[in-house]
Each structure stands twice: as C-alpha cells, then as structure tokens.
Amino acid sequence: MLGDVTISAIGRGTLFAWRELGGITILAGQVLRALLPPRLDGPELFRNLYRMGNRSLPIIALTAFFVGGIMVIQAGVLVKQLNAAGLVGWGAGYAIFREVGPMLIALMFSGRVGSNNTAELATMTVTEQLDGLRALAIDPIPYLVVPRVIAMTVSLLCLVVLGNLIALYGGAFFAMFLLDLEFSTLYYSLVDNIGWLDFVHGAIKAAVFGSAIAMTSCYFGISVRGGAVGVGKAVNAAVVAAAISIVTLDFLLTAVLP
C-alpha cells in the first residue's frame, strides 16, 4: 500500500514538472515570436531595467564583496601550509569568474527580482488586469512579459560583470589584511593566469541564468490560479523552479563550454 502511494506521488510530481516545463517552453516561444520583429513597450523596458538592475546593485555589491573575502579565507590555510601565495589571485579569479560569481549572484537576483516579478504578474492576473488588457486588444506578452525578460537578462549580465570585479577587490582586500599579501602579487597572479575565455564563460552563464529566471518568474506569474493564496504558491514555485534551473543549467554549461 505504501509503495503504491509512493509511486503515485512520484507520478504526480513527474507529470506536474513536465507540464510546467511545457508551459515555460510555450511561453518562451511566444516571447521569441514577439521579438521577430521586435514588439515591446519601450517605457516599460526602461522602467524594468532601472527597477531590476539599478536597484539590485547595492545588495549584489555587498554579497560579491564578501564572497571574494570568503574565497580568500577558505584558501588562506592552504596558502600558508603550501607557501602558494602566487596562486591566490588565480584561484580566486578562476572560481569567481566561472562558478561562484554567476551562480551566487543569479540566486540572489532570483530571490529579489524573480520573486517580486512573479508576485506582481500574479497579482495582475488574479485581479483580471491581464484580461482587461486583452479586452483592449493589447497582448500581454509583448507589453508586459517581453520587456521583463529582456530587462532581467541584461540586468543579470551587467550585475555579474560588476559583481565579479567587486568580488576580486573584496578578495584582494581580505588577502592583504588577513594573509599579509601584496596587492601586486594578487594582481599578477590573476592577469598572468586568467584569460578572456574565463570571463566569457561566466558572462554566458549570466545571460542564460537571467533568461531562465525571467521565464520561470513570468510563467508562474501569468498562470497563477486561486486568488491571494495562489499568488503565494506561485512565488514559491517560481523561486524553487529558478533555483533548480540555475543549478541544472550551470552543470550543463560547465560541461559544454570551454
């Protein structure tokens, strides 16, 4: 009996996951269709770029600064044991550019921007504002969804680039004061061993993560059901789906990208 219940629960979960994935895929197709040729609201795009990008910078900068410090603190023990001060800049830069920076900033971005976007669209859906737009012959996809997808993708890409630089400065700051390393040692260790492919690797991940967060947050926002309770469930589902997407895409991109 217990086995039947477990199998039934797994089956329901699998069907739910594939249904939601199919819905996100359909929404992605609608967004791409709206972009060929581009049909979007310019003021709405710039409003979202400011709200999602500019206003996220303080929390992203603070997070990135201490991420750089954490990288140095964790490496400090091995640096002292192995006398490998010349590898600190390379190790911190490699990890920040390729993995730690894009993933952590994307998760912070999802928690702040993605959840807010889902709540906003879900509230508009349950209060029938989207139906009102359709009654006025205004398609919600190019008017509301496309500007948010572009804004999230561009914003996260820019935030990851800035966050990586701030993380490097944070790592250098803590390395100088905690490990007594010279800034020149960190600088030459970084520039002599980190190439442009490492930067591009992280930038590609940032753009893909931004698109994934945008699609999941918009999908759960416009497909919400059940009034105020449904809004809360949609926000929770969007955050979980975005986190799973980020981790899964990070694995796939790490395996594919050079």
Image (cartoon, rainbow, N blue to C red):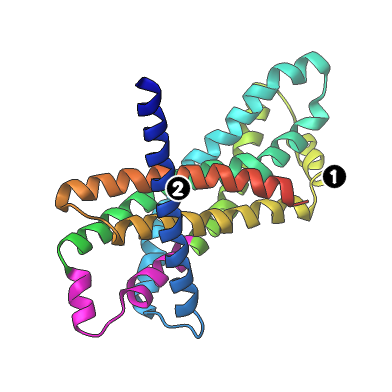
Q: Is residue 242 above or below residue 41?
A: above
Residue drawn 16% across the image and 50% down it: 228
Residue 102 on image: x %, y % = 58, 47
* Residue that appears at 73% across and 41% down: 94
Query: SS of the residue at dot 2?
Result: helix
**Dot label at residue 192:** 1
User: Residue 222 vs residue 183: left or right?
Assistant: left
Query: Callout 2: 10 Å neighbours few (<14), some, many (20+)?
Result: many
Of label 1 and label 2, which has the lower sequence position? 1
Look at the picture and state if 33 lies above or below 151.
below
Identify the main secondary structure in magenta. helix
Q: What stretch is highlighted in magenta?
A: 129-152
Of marks 1 and 2, the one in the foreground: 2
Q: Is residue 150 magenta?
A: yes
Residue type highlighted by circle 2: Ala
Is residue 61 visible in the rendered image? The answer is no
Residue 217 location (% of width, % of height): 38, 55
Residue positioned 51% across, 64% down in the render: 154
| Circle 2 residue | 242
- Residue 6 position by quadrant: top left
Distance (Cα) linking label 1 and label 2: 36 Å
Examine the rendered structure and indicate whether residue 120 appears above or below residue 71.
below
